């Protein structure tokens, strides 16, 4: 079921082959993705753009292993994800991917440290190692003194930093950022984008969804979606 | 272990809600423990009393029949009723299953020792009595075959009687005046009294035991009772026969055989046959029914507690949809979400169960302290509700947990 990782084509860490996603809306079928074929290189920084309804969110869910294709293939780091079951998809997210969301999606009841440790908990790390790793990550995003705060006590920029630290906890090769600056003011947003750029320079593959052209400028390449297909790349 | 700790931490975030949620289980388990121990205490006392009668014994008593009761108003009539010496002989000789028998003749007489006197119930009986109604000997000895043969005027007092007559160990060998005859005190034994079910326990506190033959010779079979203006005469040979059967399974057949035999020799039904074993079985059956009723009530209260937990957990799942979505997006498997919620419910119901047991143990202790009502807390009455409360957590936690696991992360993350 899972292909041999040896076969990884270094040029394409993420590959979509004629990817289609069809939703049933009442008696109508709506194609959110209508045949997308693309390959994202390892270590690249992409911005996926497009108006709402263009299929960029669906594409993000598919790429992030949160949803499955109706037809076509999705190859992620050499694994054919399109055939995986729910548990295997969870496993893919847990060990290969990191997520950054527009609304941060921190768990409000947990402290900053616990939020960062969350992926490690599911990876089965022990408490001591997790705490050490959480401290390192907090330092990396500039939140050393905030480990015992709750997310509600932080500013938006700080919350997004916590989210980035959490996304990095499992040391993923690929980071997905869904409108990472959407809930932030321009200055804070730029700080977050700088942080992402730094991570890109360290070798992470970053795929960011945004509808703001000036944000998309931070990426190396831009992919424009329209009506479920790739409109243009540039 | 870490999972459990995280579950507890999460519950502590909503202290009041968690407390209110577990309240149902607290009261459910508390009432089970309390009811079981109160029920156990009440029935144990009854069963103990019945056991004192001896489960292999049959007790046959003389009863004044109803016709006699009404006609005794006429003064010239002497009522003759009850068990006879012949009945006793037939019972002890006819049946293989009968191991031994103790006949008893009961006479009310005043006893006098030195300056003290006491209204005694003189029991004319044989040495077998002391085998069948086993009571500890405090001083001296009990009746023997030899006393019977020699027709010795000897008497055995109960501890209670001895105390009232100021008899001590030194009183052994001294003469006790019963009616107008002297008897030598040869022993003091303990006594029981009371009622077991519907049967009077054979001995009483004011008993004085003398050999049966001696009672016949000294006091005869006729009792004259003087009441205002009238004289009542009764002739009763034996008031009671205690029959011991060799084995438990022969008790009932022997009892009915004796009853048939007595029916043939007695024109009136002036006797009653009671079987402590039957009474014991009846009491045990009652106890079983009692336990079933208690169990059902307790079961219903635990069910209500469980539904309460399920309700809150379902609400909690809805409220935490986003959290579940985040955990799933990060890579938590369905199974791990199920376990997380299940642990929370089991922790809730288990802690609730523990508090309930504390309450359930305290309540019977207070009841015993204030009302002197006996209560018995058994290991079973603690372990069972504990196990049930954990089971309640699993059963009623499973559905909310499964619902939590079905949460779609994509939709959940959009959830505000």
Image (cartoon, coloured by chain):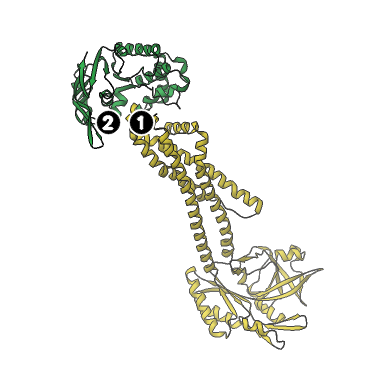
Chain colours: A green, B yellow
Residue B290 horizontal/vertical position (percent): 52, 59
- Which of these two is toward me, A45 or B104? A45
Q: Residue at x 46, y 38 (%)?
A: B347
Q: Residue at x 39, y 30 (%)?
A: B322
Identify the residue under disc 1.
Answer: B412
Question: Can you say whether B79 is above or below B120 in the image?
Answer: below
Identify the residue under disc 2.
Answer: A88
* Farthest-out residue, right: B115
**Would you say residue B58 is visible in this rendering?**
yes
**Would you say residue B95 is visible in this rendering?**
no
Residue A56 horizontal/vertical position (percent): 26, 23
- Which of these two is toward me, B6 or B47? B6
Residue A201 horizontal/vertical position (percent): 30, 10
> Tag 1, which chain?
B
Badge 2 marks a residue whose secondary structure is helix
- Which of these two is toward me, A4 or A56? A56
Closer to the eye: label 1 or 2: 1
- Is residue B104 shown left or right of residue B353? right
Assess disc 2: are there few (<14), some (14-19) or many (≥20) residues with their C-alpha within 10 Å of its C-alpha. Answer: some
Badge 1 marks a residue whose secondary structure is helix
Q: How much space separates mark 1 and mark 2, taking CA atoms? A: 20 Å
Q: Quadrant of residue B408?
A: top left
Q: Quadrant of residue B194?
A: bottom right
Question: Can you say whether B182 is above or below B349 in the image?
Answer: below
- Is residue A143 shown left or right of residue A55? right
Question: Can you say whether B231 is above or below A152 in the image?
Answer: below
Mark 1 vs mark 2: same chain?
no
Q: Give the number of callouts.
A: 2
């Amino acid at each position: 079921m899972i292909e041999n990782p040896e076969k990884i084509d270094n040029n394409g860490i993420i590959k979509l082959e004629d990817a289609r996603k069809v939703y049933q809306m009442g008696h109508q079928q709506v194609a959110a993705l209508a045949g997308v074929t693309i390959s994202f290189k390892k270590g690249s920084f992409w911005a996926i753009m497009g108006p709402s309804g263009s299929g960029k969110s669906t594409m993000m869910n598919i790429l992030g292993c949160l949803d499955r294709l109706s037809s076509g293939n999705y190859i992620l780091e050499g694994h054919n994800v399109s055939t995986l079951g729910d548990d295997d998809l969870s496993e893919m997210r847990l060990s290969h991917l990191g997520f950054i969301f527009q609304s941060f999606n921190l768990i409000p009841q947990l402290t900053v440290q616990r939020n960062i440790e969350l992926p490690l908990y599911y990876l089965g790390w022990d408490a001591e190692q997790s705490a050490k790793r959480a401290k390192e990550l907090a330092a990396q995003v500039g939140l050393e003194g905030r480990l015992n705060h709750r997310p509600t006590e932080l500013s938006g920029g700080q919350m997004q930093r916590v989210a980035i630290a959490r996304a990095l906890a499992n040391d993923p090769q690929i980071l997905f950022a869904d409108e990472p600056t959407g809930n932030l003011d321009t200055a804070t947003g730029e700080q977050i984008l700088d942080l992402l750029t730094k991570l890109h320079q360290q070798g992470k593959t970053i795929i960011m969804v945004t509808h703001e052209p000036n944000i998309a400028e931070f990426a190396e390449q831009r992919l424009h979606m329209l009506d479920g297909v790739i409109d243009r790349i540039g | 272990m870490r999972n459990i700790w995280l579950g507890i931490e999460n519950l502590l975030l909503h202290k009041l809600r968690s407390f209110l949620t577990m309240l149902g289980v607290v009261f459910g388990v508390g009432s089970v423990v309390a009811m079981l121990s109160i029920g156990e205490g009440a029935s144990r006392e009854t069963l103990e009393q019945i056991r004192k009668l001896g489960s292999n014994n049959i007790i046959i008593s003389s009863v004044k029949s109803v016709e006699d009761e009404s006609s005794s108003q006429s003064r010239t009539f002497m009522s003759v009723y009850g068990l006879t010496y012949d009945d006793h002989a037939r019972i002890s000789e006819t049946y293989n299953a009968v191991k031994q028998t103790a006949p008893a003749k009961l006479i009310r007489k005043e006893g006098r020792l030195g300056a003290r006197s006491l209204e005694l119930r003189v029991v004319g009986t044989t040495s077998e009595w002391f085998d069948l109604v086993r009571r500890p000997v405090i001083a001296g000895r009990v009746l023997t075959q030899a006393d019977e043969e020699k027709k010795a005027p000897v008497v055995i007092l109960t501890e209670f009687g001895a105390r009232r007559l100021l008899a001590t160990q030194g009183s052994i060998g001294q003469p006790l005046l019963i009616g107008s005859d002297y008897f030598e005190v040869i022993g003091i034994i303990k006594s029981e009294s009371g009622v077991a079910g519907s049967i009077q326990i054979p001995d009483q506190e004011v008993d004085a035991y003398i050999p049966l033959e001696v009672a016949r010779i000294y006091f005869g079979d006729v009792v004259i009772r003087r009441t205002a203006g009238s004289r009542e005469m009764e002739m009763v040979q034996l008031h009671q026969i205690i029959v011991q059967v060799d084995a438990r399974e022969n008790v009932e057949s022997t009892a009915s055989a004796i009853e048939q035999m007595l029916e043939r020799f007695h024109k009136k039904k002036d006797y009653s046959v009671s079987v402590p074993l039957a009474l014991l079985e009846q009491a045990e059956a009652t106890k079983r029914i009692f336990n079933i009723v208690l169990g059902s009530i307790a079961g219903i209260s635990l069910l209500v507690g469980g539904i309460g937990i399920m309700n809150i957990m379902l609400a909690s799942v809805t409220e935490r949809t986003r959290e579940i979505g985040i955990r799933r997006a990060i890579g938590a498997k369905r199974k791990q979400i199920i376990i997380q919620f299940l642990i929370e419910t089991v922790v809730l119901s288990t802690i609730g169960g523990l508090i309930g047991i504390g309450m359930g143990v305290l309540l019977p202790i207070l009841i015993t302290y204030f009302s002197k009502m006996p209560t018995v807390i058994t290991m079973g009455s603690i372990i069972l509700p504990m196990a049930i409360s954990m089971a309640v957590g699993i059963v009623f936690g499973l559905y909310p947990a499964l619902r939590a696991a079905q949460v779609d992360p994509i939709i959940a993350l959009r959830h505000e």
